[in-house]
Image (tube, rainbow, N blue to C red):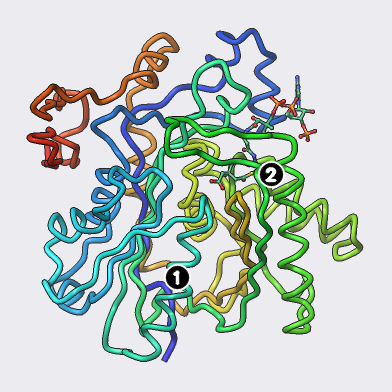
Amino acid sequence: MKIGIEKISFFTPPFYIEMKHLAQARDVDPAKYTIGIGQDQMAVSPVHYDAVALAINAGISLDLTAADKAEIDTIILATESGVDHSKSGSTWIHRALGIQPHARAIEMKQACYSATAAIRLAMGHISLHPDKKVLVIASDIANYGIHTPGEPTQGAGAVAMLLSSDAKIMAFDTQSVPYTVEISDFWRPLYSDTPFVDGKYSNQAYVETFQGAWNGYKALTGRVATDFDALLFHVPYTKMGKKTLQSLAATGDLTDETLSTFTAIYDEAVIYNRRVGNLYTGSLYLSLISFLEQAEAARAGARIGMFSYGSGAVGEFFAGELMPNFETYLQKERHEQLLDHRFLLDIPTYEMVLSERIAVDEAGNWLADTSLGRPGQVVLEKISAHKRYYKMI
Ligand code: HMG
């Protein structure tokens, strides 16, 4: 029995901006964004592409079979962009994907980390019930607001994973090490649409949490960095993973030579992230997809080390092994087309889209302009008497 990823795919909304245009509008040297931050483009999500709609589209792109839908007994939406304090986004996913009724549907939260928690819980569940499958979808919209320091590190998208005891792409090791410390580096109180963030401190907290999890992992397993063929990270912006690799060189875990090898592999593992930006819960897993589909080091039998981080803060270091013929289960062409066929927004339009908020009338009604989007994609159609309705356009 190999518990892990049987199918994996992502979705990002069909709108984006070029970082060099944003730099021009903010009177910043474009190299700060493209090299200093490490982002080329940024996904932009209008209100009708909310986190649930993004998640449904990611779920659709898994091409679940009738057998998958009958075997999925748990759906977990990992998000910090939830649309309701009570009802989980997974209930809409359950309906839209036509999953059998005897399934549990829940939502999980711990900043960008919760998809990893969902995977670890799914592994325990599948080991008890090897005939069942778990659908984990990580979906978020990173919106810091215009003219903020976090603005160049926004983004949006969702990653969907079908986990089972028949891991066709990656089998996860049972050993992993989490690390929790209560801090306020990035947080979004219930009364705020946008997060509060202490940017420099969040970078430091990320690296310290990584070191905490990594040292625990080394002590538990006896493994060293060079036992891995690639090291992947949560990617709030692509420079962050490089900073973390450099921290391994500073502690003597990597030499100059192995640092440059891991950095070159990491560069291929963030090709998609450079074009999407931060998708919070999905960022590490978008990097995994980029690695699987774009990196030369991705080959059967490769051992991949992964670090998940969620502000507040929880991190976890864990690992997986690529399965024989894993590449036949990927969707490289579909993903490249998704990124290549987006609408480019100018900066004034992006600012308008980002500032838009859903405003229901007194009866709790609101109607989306669903002409803005791509046919075949699912969007939030309307809110009627405070109830949300999604439809395919
Ligand atoms: P900033 O103050 O705008 O940027 O904040 P900076 O002045 O620190 O510059 C950034 C980098 O660009 C620096 O490189 C500069 O040297 C370089 P570094 O020293 O970091 O290697 N630079 C240039 N490079 C080339 N040419 C130039 C040039 N100018 C400067 N001309 C910051 C940047 C990321 C802090 C900000 O955007 C921010 O606050 N972002 C949001 C917070 C964030 O993403 N934190 C990451 C860690 S926390 C995390 O990952 C969790 C999170 O995903 C949330 C969750 O868990 O839910 C955020």
Disc 2, SS:
helix
* Quadrant in which residue 66 is drawn: bottom left
**Which residue occupies 55% across, 22% down?**
19
Residue for point 15% across, 67% down? 99
Q: Residues within 10 Å of mark 2 (few under 14, many from 20)?
A: some
Q: What residue would you read off at disc 2?
A: 240
Q: How many marks?
A: 2
For badge 2, the amino acid type reads: Met
**In this orientation, does residue 107 appear?**
yes
Q: Quadrant of residue 201?
A: top right
Left or right of 201, for residue 237: left
Image coordinates for residue 73, horizontal then vertical, percent: 23, 76
| Secondary structure state at the residue bearing disc 1 | helix
Is the CB of mark 2 within 8 Å of ligand 1? yes
Residue at point 78%, 84% (across, down): 222
Tell which of 236 and 66 is nearer to you. Answer: 236
